[in-house]
Image: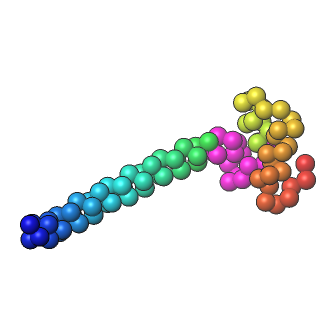
Amino acid sequence: MMETWVSSVPVVAAVVGAFIAVMQFLFNWWQKKKLAKLLKVFNTVDTDSSGAISYSELRAGLEKRGFGDDEIRAMFAALDLNQYVF
């Protein structure tokens, strides 16, 4: 009985290895898809194609989606790394 279990270890290891490889592939594919969607949204809001979203661009994009002035100011303040004064 012990020989059967020991002889199946390489098979189990190969199956586990293949499963891990498939999971890594799916995770990488999902991340790329998610990143592509995020980049599309960013480029939609970055209307002057500067590579940065200004307060006015953020405001325009969020107003289209129903956000109010206080919400927009709070979001921008939380995201602003340059301490932009608006």
Q: Which residue is depicted at the point 82% across and 38% down?
A: 71
Residue 57 placement (x, y as % from top left): 76, 42
For this view, does 71 lie left or right of residue 50?
right
Q: Please name whichever residue, 19 or 46, is drawn nearer the observer in this view of the structure.
A: 19
Which coloring applies here? rainbow
Quarter of the image where the N terminus is located: bottom left
Residue 78 placement (x, y as % from top left): 80, 52
Q: Which residue is depicted at the point 72% across and 53% down?
A: 52
Please give the range of residues in magenta. Answer: 42-57
Q: Which residue is depicted at the point 68% across and 54% down?
A: 51
For this view, does 40 lie left or right of residue 2?
right
Residue 82 placement (x, y as % from top left): 82, 60
Residue 70, located in which quarter of the rendered image?
A: top right
Where is 19 relative to 38, above or below? below
Q: Which residue is depicted at the point 80% across and 48% down?
A: 76
Q: Residue furthest right?
A: 85
Residue 37, located in which quarter of the rendered image?
A: top right
Total tally of numbered discs in the picture = 0
Magenta highlight on residue 66: no
Where is 2 relative to 57, above or below? below
Q: Please name whichever residue, 74 or 3, is drawn nearer the observer in this view of the structure.
A: 3
Q: Is residue 67 shown to the viewer in this render? A: yes
Q: Is residue 7 shown to the viewer in this render? A: no
For this view, does 76 lie left or right of residue 5?
right
For this view, does 32 lie left or right of residue 45?
left
